[in-house]
Image (cartoon, rainbow, N blue to C red):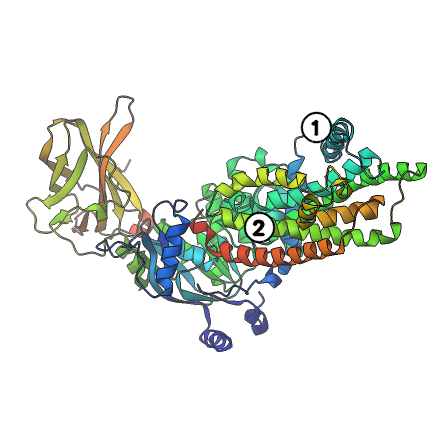
Amino acid sequence: MEEKYAEMQKAGLAIRIRGLKKEYRLGQIGRTTLQKEIKRWWARKRGLEDPYSKIGQPKRVIGERFMALNGIDLTIHKGEALGIIGRNGAGKSTLLKIISRITAPSEGEVEIIGRVTSMLEVGTGFHGEMTGRENVYLNGAILGMTKAEIDSKMDEIIDFSEVGEFIDTPVKRYSSGMYVKLAFSVAAHLDNEIQIMDEVLAVGDVEFQKKCLQKMRAAARVEGRTVLYVSHNMSTIRRLCDRCIVLDEGKIIYDGNVDKAISLYMGTGETLCREICFTDKNRPYGRYSQKFLIERLMLVEADMPRYAENEKAFFDIDCKALQDMRNVCLRMEFWYQDGTKIGSMLSNSVDTIREGSCRFRLEIDLAGFMAGKYSADIVAYTVGLNGMQELLDGVYPGIIFEVENTPEADRYVEWNHQYWGHIRLRDMRLTLK
Amino acid sequence: MKNNSNNDRNNYICISPDRSWTDLRLDEVWRYRDLIFLFTKRYFALTYAQTILGPLWLFLKPFLTSIMFTLVFGYIAGIQTDGVPKFLFFLCGTAVWNFFSACVSDNAKTFIDNASLFGKVYFPRLTVPVSKVTAFLIRFLIQISMVLIVLLYYCVNGNVRPHFELWIVLPLLLLQLGLMGMGVGIIISSLTTKYRDLSVLVEFGIQLWMYGTPVVYPLSQLPQGWMRTAALLNPVTAPVELFRLILLGEGLFSPASYLWSLGFTVIVTVLGVVVFNHVEKTFLDTV
């Protein structure tokens, strides 16, 4: 113990994770009978296989067990701001839960130097009947502050939260905006050396979000705290973190540069190809319905999905209708390579589709897409009787393509994605009067 | 920002699956004592929020229960109360029993009631049961003031002769009952994370337990033989009888029964804390 600590201190580490695994049992846990459990225990004692495990299943599922984390090794230095990204179910939340000691690992170890604040959800322990001030005390104490520490920060917290004179009103009378602002302010004013955050920045209005981000950045850059940040919002990851890991199926598949990690996560780091077959791996949210599946996408008249600005792109999409369908539409949701969603395109609806395989020709106009790599999710839906969309299937991403820079006579400056956005809107007209 | 290495040393932890059963981290509970205090305060703030009578309920509940007990057990069933005025006898008994049973039944729900809180942030989980016991202790002290007023009235009239010289022991007795209640409660709570049947059983079991404890009757009313032996084996019997003996001046004190009760308290508290700490690590995966 003592040597391990000295070793970490010497290397300036805040967190060291070695061989971390976490398994969950699948199915209904409450139904495991006592008898089964005794048998399982007995088999383990004799060093035998679990008598209730099944073989021949995917690697991550072993019998009734599911490996949420499957061997994580990670070292984080003091003062580092680490982003963690990955698809739903990749194991991000489990990793944070273990580091913040909410649940214990199944294998491996996590060593931490410093007090940990976990903001997996702001406002934990808030109670509507209590006033804002009382809730600040309770919430602060839950997060590990002493009463004296909270006292010394009270004014700062109230000030930051913009709640003002409502601080002595029961929080059940707060608007939801005020509620989260107050909750976030408590968490943001903790002195702890390590801060763990799970998409907490998605609170309040734009102005407040900006303020939160600044506060968080100051925590990492100025005060030298270690920040672990999980988010699906790539632009906050980019602004906050100086290192990023990508999790997939319970493992770290990339560790390093933030931009590279994001492009890997967005799929834009993958090589371009002319034909994509979709499997359930492309459906992280599952199949939306049992009626319609998008199976394959092929480029038309092109070897590579690489287009010039303002070009038109053509795709053939193979689908399978499992029943007769009416009014099927497609929607493409476009992302730029840095993880910003830039917009969507809707298609006309196709009146009748007979049961069985069918092929669509899709034409998209890339006018306005400036040079860079893009990905697009493809979603199929129908419009139901009540005017609501009924999702049929969705592939994420459906296609990754590149738009190449085409020199134009009337534009001499290169497009600046960072400040101008990713779409060039229709040109304005300027005349001399 | 505190950055001295001594502080870092104190904040070093190693999380691994094979944390020993005896690693209870009680020092951490102490570090979070402000949280215990705030939880206790929250209990009172929330229980009587938006009620008209507010804290008056603290007195009303035992008062009405005791009147009912006096009528039903005292007059209809005709239970003798060792010469202690019946109302006073029942008032004292229900106050003590309510303290104990609240410790058991409320702590038995610790994990289920706090699952969402425990799932989001780490703090020593033991602070929750400890704060519950503290809250019930305060509630009891408020209620006992009512008993004392009634007692004063009867003392002046010369109906009761309390053992004033032993009153100093009473806090210790309360502490024992609180620990025993907490121990039983958190053991049940640890088991209910896996086997939900228990939570149904608790309310019912506590009711039965009350009738097995000399609350609505004095121990002396039980005939010598198996019934008296069974009652003496109940670990709550001795503290309740002793409490009344000291406070009201009447009651049976059996040293053997009391020693057993004391031993039971120690076992159940230690076992409770150990099991609770063990379950706490992974209960979120099963709830």
Amino acid on which the number 2 mark rests in the picture: Ile
Q: Identify the residue at horizontal 7%, vertical 44% (top origin).
A: A300
Asked whether residue B7 is in view, the answer is yes
Q: Identify the residue at horizontal 67%, vertical 50% (top origin).
A: B233
Q: Are marks 2 and 1 in contact (CB under 8 Å)?
A: no
Could you tell me residue A366's position as x and y percent? 18, 42
Q: Mark 2 or mark 1, which has the lower sequence index?
A: 1
Asked whether residue A154 is in view, the answer is no
In this rendering, which labeled residue sits more in front, label 2 or label 1?
2
Left or right relative to A162: residue A82: left
User: Looking at the rendering, which quadrant does residue B97 occupy?
Assistant: top right
Mark 2–mark 1 distance (CA, rounded to whole Å): 33 Å
Outermost residue on the front side: it is B225
Left or right relative to A329: residue A137: right
Secondary structure beneath disc 2? helix
Secondary structure beneath disc 1? loop
- Chain assignment, label 2: B
Q: Disc 2 designates what residue?
A: B186
Q: Nearer the viewer, residue A419 or A111?
A: A111
Q: Identify the residue at horizontal 42%, vertical 56% (top origin).
A: A96
- Chain assignment, label 1: B
Binning the other alpha carbons within 10 Å of mark 1 as few (below 14), some (14 to 19) or many (20 upward) gives: few
Q: Nearer the viewer, residue A310 or B156?
A: B156
For the image shown, how many numbered marks are present on the structure? Answer: 2
Q: Nearer the viewer, residue A105 or B35?
A: A105
Binning the other alpha carbons within 10 Å of mark 2 as few (below 14), some (14 to 19) or many (20 upward) gives: many
Amino acid on which the number 1 mark rests in the picture: Ile
Could you tell me residue B219's position as x and y percent? 75, 43
Could you tell me residue B11's position as x and y percent? 55, 67
Depicted B72 relative to depicted A312: above or below? above
The circle drawn on residue B52 is 1
User: Looking at the rendering, which quadrant does residue B46 occupy?
Assistant: top right
